[in-house]
Amino acid sequence: MLRFDSDYMETAHPRILQKLTEINFDKNTSYGFDVYTESAKDKIRKECNCPDALVYFLIGGTQTNKVAIDALIEGYEAVICASTGHIATHETGAIESCGHKVITLEGENGKLMPETLEGYMQSFYADKNHEHSAQPGLVYISFPTEYGTIYSRAELESLRKICDSYSLRLYVDGARLGYGLMSPVCDITLPELARLADGFYIGGTKVGAMLGEALVIPNPDSVKKLFVQIKRHGALLAKGWVAGVQFDTLFTDGLYFEISKNAIDNAMYLRDELKNLGYEMFLDSPTNQQFVVVDDEKLDLIKDKVGYGFWHKLDGRTVIRFATSWATEKSQVDELIDLLG
C-alpha cells in the first residue's frame, strides 16, 4: 500500500540512526548538558545568525507550543491565531490549559493576514470595556501553514510591525519549517525569520528526526527561566542527548535543507502531474502538502490502495491531502500518479 498520509511516517534519516548507534554506550550528561546538544545548539545559532539565542530541544510540536507561548507572555494574556491554526484545532486545548485564551480570526488559505490582525486590534482597543476581556499578548502563525501555504517576507514584516505597535509577541510554529524554507516561492531565510520572530521552533519530527523540535528564542531577555519553565511543564528530556544528536546531525553539512528540498521536489512533481491528469487542486500549495479534489467514486476505488489525509467533504467530492516527506522517493510518486490516472 502506498502511504502519503503524513510526513512523519518514517523513523529517521539513516545518518541519525548511524550516529545514535555509534554513541549508544557512551556515558552522557543528562538534561541537555552534553557535548552533542551543545554542538547542535551552536550550529543552529550559527544558521540563524543569532549567537546569543536560547535553543532547547523538546519532544513534539504541541509540547513546544505550550512551553514557548506560556514562557513568552503573562498568565493573563491571550493568543491570536488564524481559525485554522494548529493550537486552535488539533491541540486539545493545550494552550488554554495554561490559562491563555486562544482568539481565532478568519484566515486566508491558512494565513493570518496583517490587515485582519490590524483590524482586530483596532476594534479591541476601541472597545471602552476592553480591560474586561482577555488581553492579546501574542500572535501565533505556522510556517508553512496547515494548508501548506507560506508567508512572504512582506507579510511577515507587516505582522512584525503590527505586533510592535501593540506590544504583541510573534511566535512561529515551524513543525514543517524546512519544507517552507525550501519552497520555490519562499523569499525568507532562517536568519530573517529569527530577526522577525520572538520565538519559533525548527521542526524535526516531520523533517528527518526520530522525534524532537528545536525551540529558538532569539532574544534571551524576552523570557525568564526558560529551563525551569520547560521542567515545570514536564517537557524536560532526561536523555537530552537523544534529541541533541539528531539535530547536531541534521545541521551538519546542510542535511536539514537537503532532505527538505527532496520533499518539495516530489510534491511539486506530484502537483504538476495531477494537474496534467485533470485533477483540481483545492488550493495552490507550494510546499509538501498537496490538497486534491477527488470524486467520491474514484476515492472508493483507491482508498484501500493508498493512504491519504481526509480534509473535508464537498458535494459528491472529497478534498484529500497527499503529504510527501524527506524520505519520499520519486518512484513512489510515480506509483501514486499511475493509481490516480
Image: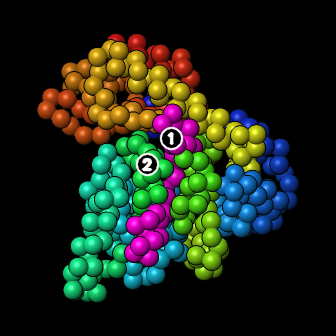
Tell me the amino acid under the disc marked 2.
Tyr
**What is the secondary structure assignment of the residue under circle 2?**
loop
Q: Residue furthest right?
A: 26
For this rendering, which residue is in front, 101 or 33? 101
- The number of discs equals 2
Say few, some or many: other residues with alpha carbon within 10 Å of mark 1 (under 14 / 14 to 19 / 20 or more). Answer: some
Which disc is residue 143 wearing? Answer: none
Q: Indicate the quadrant where residue 217 lies.
A: bottom right
The secondary structure type at the circle numbered 1 is loop
Question: Horizontal and vertical percent for residue 306?
Answer: 39, 25
| Left or right of residue 297: residue 221 | right
- Residue 233, magenta (yes or no): no
Residue 135: x, y in percent? 34, 79
Magenta stretch in the rendered image: 160-187
Residue count near mark 2 (Cα–Cα under 10 Å), binned few <14, some 14–19, many ≥20: many
Q: Which amino acid does label 1 sit on?
A: Cys
**Label at residue 186:** 1
Q: Quadrant where the N terminus lies?
A: top left
What residue is disc 2 on?
151
Residue drawn at (21%, 21%), measured in percent from left and top?
297
* Above or below, comparing residue 195 to residue 127 in the picture: above
Q: How far apart are marks 2 and 1 (CA)?
A: 8 Å
Residue 161: x and y in percent read: 44, 65
Where residue 61 appears, as percent x and y from the top left, is 51, 56
